[in-house]
Amino acid sequence: MNKKTENKNRIKQKPEAVKAPDLLAPDTRTILLIALIEGFSLIFVEILSAKILNAYFGSSMKVWTVVLSLTLLFLALGYFYGGKLANENRLRNLSRVLAFSSIAVCLTLIFSNALFGIVAGMEFFTALIITAIFLLGPQLFLFGCISPLLVRLFNDKQEDVVYSSGRVYFVSTAGGILGALLLGYFLLDAFGITINYILVSLLLYGALYSLYGKITKTGGILLGFLIFINLISYNRINQKNEGGMTVVYESEGVMGQIKVIDTRLDAKFSLRSLAINGIHQSKIMNIPEAYTFWNYPHLINFFARIKPAESQTLVLGLGGGSVVKELNSKFPDIDVVELDKRIITVANEYFYLSSNKLKFFNDDARTYLRKCRKKYDLVVYDLLTGETQPNYVFTREALTEMKKRLNKDALVIVNYQGIVEGEGDLAFRTLYKTFREAGFTVNFKSKEQHRFGDIVFVLSHGNPDYSKVKLADLNECCRRAKNMQDIEQKNISNFVPDLTGIEVLTDDKPRLELLNSNAIYEWRHSMRQAVSNQMLGLGQSLFR
């Protein structure tokens, strides 16, 4: 070969491509640490995102069904795509997934309230699905990508792929369990949603740092971006806005969001409301007399006064304490059972309920009735979590247990929300039949039978003599209520529902929420318009 031919061959030969430096292969400890952080962060995002949605859409069973279904969908898509990413450049792909995950988490905070405003005028489930997709989708999809990448990294280390998969998913699940326990028992109550979301975004950045072992130039830029966005989100969510509506107390917890809201009426007076998951549970005039604006506490007080003042009285469910305060004007000895201990504190500190005559029990209503040995002459059910009531306290078995705690001729009063007659009355008719099957004489009072509203059931043995109670006997709050003026003449409805084909509620068929779903969504829709959208319009966050 002559020199000319040799030179031509050299020209034809392409120079060998210079490979970009890749990440060093992580050791086993680093891989498992990332799996632990992924599982921990995943459960945080699942719970916290659901809590954000609950603040606007409530916590009914159908809402949770949508949330859980979308959670599984986006995780499945992430697992599938993560398997594709694991085929090549897996270390670099893993670092990118961790970086995008931390960004997606912190962006959720800054856009969530704005997203509620966008869907405000939409139909309930359309708005729920759109909001859940944007809040849950990006984060959970990226989390789903992580585990397949970790498994493949183990495989690159010549380890058994089946054993490696088991280790990754075991450690990830252990992280989820740890996260659920910490969030449920401490972090959510202590710090709320915002701080915990910030914690997750920084924790994911920590996983990325463990992969590199140092803060690179790009990593430093990412960290600065995360801190900047999180600070903006925190300040925006926690800024104080007035505008006639002031949140004077707020708490996030596993049992729901609690808010105490003051709404200015004039220069002197304001309304005070207790909202749980965005639904008003109590509304009073913000003065020590705490006159309630709801009608049902007055009705309960009227029916209860058939019993003598020395009656042993039990109230299941506290809320803002309007029912207890009305009853306490006649009955000095009242036991109050409330599952959420925060409610007990709020009722005493913000709703003027402080009284030495009341005994509070932080317990579940049915559990209390099972284990207590005291018997009562008057029992009042006033149980609500947002817009839903617990199914299990109104089953035939639960009512049988409750009857063991009643003295002879005891009276049971149940506050419920629904429709008495017409479309959507199935829940009312089912409750009516269940009470009868439990051995009670059933009477009730409802303001408007054809529309959604409060229904006060009076359960007894025999027919109580309501002529014993006069409007003049009631306390001032009840006497002044506009819907009580004709209570002496129209105290009990004469309507008898058609019970043909109606099934009794039992423990193995907890169907009450499903039967009352139309009324539940009507209530939630009205609260979205009256409370949530108004707060968003004033620039207030629906969560903290």
Image: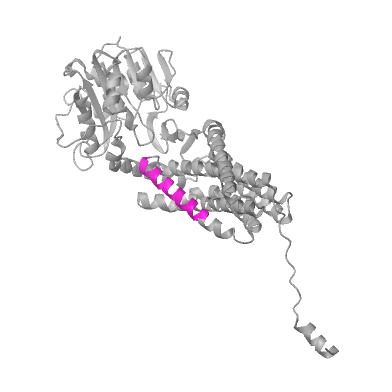
Q: With respect to residue 78, does 514 lie above or below?
A: above
In the rendered image, the quadrant that contains the N terminus is bottom right
Q: Is residue 117 visible?
A: no
Residue 189, x across and y down, in percent: 53, 32
Residue interval drawn in magenta: 60-79
| Outermost residue to the top | 310
The image quadrant that residue 186 belongs to is top right
Residue 338, x across and y down, in percent: 41, 24
Is 41 contained in the magenta span? no
Horizontally, residue 383 falls left or right of residue 299, namely right
Is 76 contained in the magenta span? yes
Q: Nearer the viewer, residue 162 or 25?
A: 162
Decide whether the magenta segment is chiefly helix, strand or loop.
helix
Horizontally, residue 448 falls left or right of residue 8, namely left
Residue 511, x across and y down, in percent: 29, 37
Q: Is residue 8 visible?
A: yes
Q: Residue at x 35, y 35 (%)?
A: 388
Q: Nearer the viewer, residue 41 or 281?
A: 41
| Outermost residue to the right | 3
Q: Nearer the viewer, residue 176 or 57?
A: 176
The image quadrant that residue 167 belongs to is top right
Q: Residue at x 14, y 36 (%)?
A: 500
Residue 147, x across and y down, in percent: 57, 50
Q: Residue at x 30, y 33 (%)?
A: 508
Horizontally, residue 310 falls left or right of residue 152, namely left
The colouring scheme, among rainbow, by chain, secondary structure or one colour, is one colour
